[in-house]
């Protein structure tokens, strides 16, 4: 039974690509994400993380099982209503196009605009606010192609914010960024959660970022849930060694009192 306060509920999700035989990419995946929660999905390459995000976004349809948003099955949403409720920032951002930053952020307003797509005062206000929130107002007239990877990432996040969703899905938004930009993106998401009550569901590779920011984590291995819960509960040395198949050192972060992990190189074993 779906919790009344859940923003996302997955029940018995299974997914197999066509032509992939009987091997499931995801199998028997069930979890709830509460409203206003920062929820992180972890796991090694090929564990099904990106597929899970595409199922939650409605881009892919599960082979079996259900996804519910706000207590309503995803299949009962029209595409426009789903876009008003949920914003998705994919792992690989489109790069080969020419558009100003402001125009790209304005594209996030499409679910709220009429058939003609004419800008209204609310659209302008939302776009200006999203650019200010993500710190990109200063280059609103620049071509997106001229931006660095970190700047471009913030532009796409601003477009997602301009959508005014209650749920934001992000697939590895920090994977191509340096540490300073990684923290900036994570702080942005944390601010959206705290200041706007937005629900954040994010795929990460960085275990320590997940431990620092997530309210709850889901750890996948070979398409199945291996562990889930708060970072202190779900992220243990034993769990990570079993999932990633390499040794780890574990201690506590000196400022946040959350678990911190370091993989052990071969030369130190």
Image: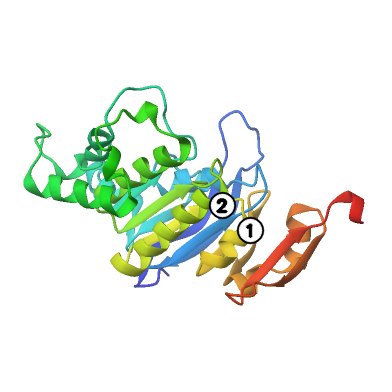
Q: Quadrant of residue 17?
A: top right
Q: Which residue is mark 2?
A: 204
Question: Which residue is at the front of the view, 88 or 147?
Answer: 147
Q: Quadrant of residue 96?
A: top left
- Colour scheme of the picture: rainbow
Mark 1 Cα shell of 10 Å, populated few (<14), some (14-19), many (≥20): many
* Residue, far bottom: 257
* Residue, far front: 138
Q: Quadrant of the N terminus?
A: bottom left
Residue 86 is left or right of residue 178, and the answer is left
Question: Which residue is at the front of the view, 254 or 210?
Answer: 254
- On screen, 149 above or below 8? above
**Numbered-mark total:** 2
Residue at position x 48%, y 59% from top? 11
The answer to whether mark 1 and mark 2 are in CB contact below 8 A is yes
Residue at position x 34%, y 30% from top? 144
Mark 2 Cα shell of 10 Å, populated few (<14), some (14-19), many (≥20): many
Residue at position x 31%, y 68% from top? 195
- x then y, percent, for residue 186: 47, 57
Calculate the distance from the C-alpha at mark 1 to the C-alpha at mark 2: 7 Å
Q: Is residue 77 visible?
A: no
Residue at position x 33%, y 51% from top? 134
The local secondary structure at tag 1 comes to: helix
Q: Which residue is mark 1?
A: 207
């Amino acid at each position: 039974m779906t919790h009344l306060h859940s923003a996302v509920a997955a029940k018995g999700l299974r997914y197999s690509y066509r032509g992939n035989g009987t091997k499931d990419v995801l199998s028997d995946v069930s979890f709830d994400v509460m409203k206003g929660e920062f929820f992180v999905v972890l796991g090694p390459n090929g564990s099904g993380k990106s597929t899970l995000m595409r199922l939650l976004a409605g881009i892919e349809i599960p082979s079996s099982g259900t996804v519910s948003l706000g207590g309503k099955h995803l299949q009962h949403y029209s595409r426009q209503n789903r876009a008003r409720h949920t914003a998705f920032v994919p792992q690989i951002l489109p790069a080969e196009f020419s558009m100003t930053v402001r125009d790209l952020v304005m594209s996030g307003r499409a679910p709220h605009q009429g058939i003609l797509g004419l800008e209204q005062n609310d659209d302008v206000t939302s776009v200006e606010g999203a650019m200010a929130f993500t710190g990109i107002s200063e280059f609103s007239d620049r071509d997106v192609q001229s931006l660095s990877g970190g700047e471009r990432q913030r532009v796409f996040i601003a477009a997602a914010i301009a959508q005014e969703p209650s749920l934001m899905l992000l697939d590895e938004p920090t994977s191509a960024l340096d540490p300073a930009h990684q923290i900036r993106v994570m702080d942005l998401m944390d601010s959206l959660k705290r200041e706007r009550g937005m629900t954040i569901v994010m795929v990460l590779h960085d275990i320590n970022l997940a431990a620092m920011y997530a309210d709850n984590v889901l750890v996948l291995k070979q398409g199945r849930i291996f562990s889930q819960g708060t970072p202190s509960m779900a992220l243990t040395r034993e769990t990570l060694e079993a999932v990633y198949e390499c040794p780890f050192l574990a201690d506590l972060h000196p400022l946040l009192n959350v678990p911190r992990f370091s993989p052990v190189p071969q030369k130190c074993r």
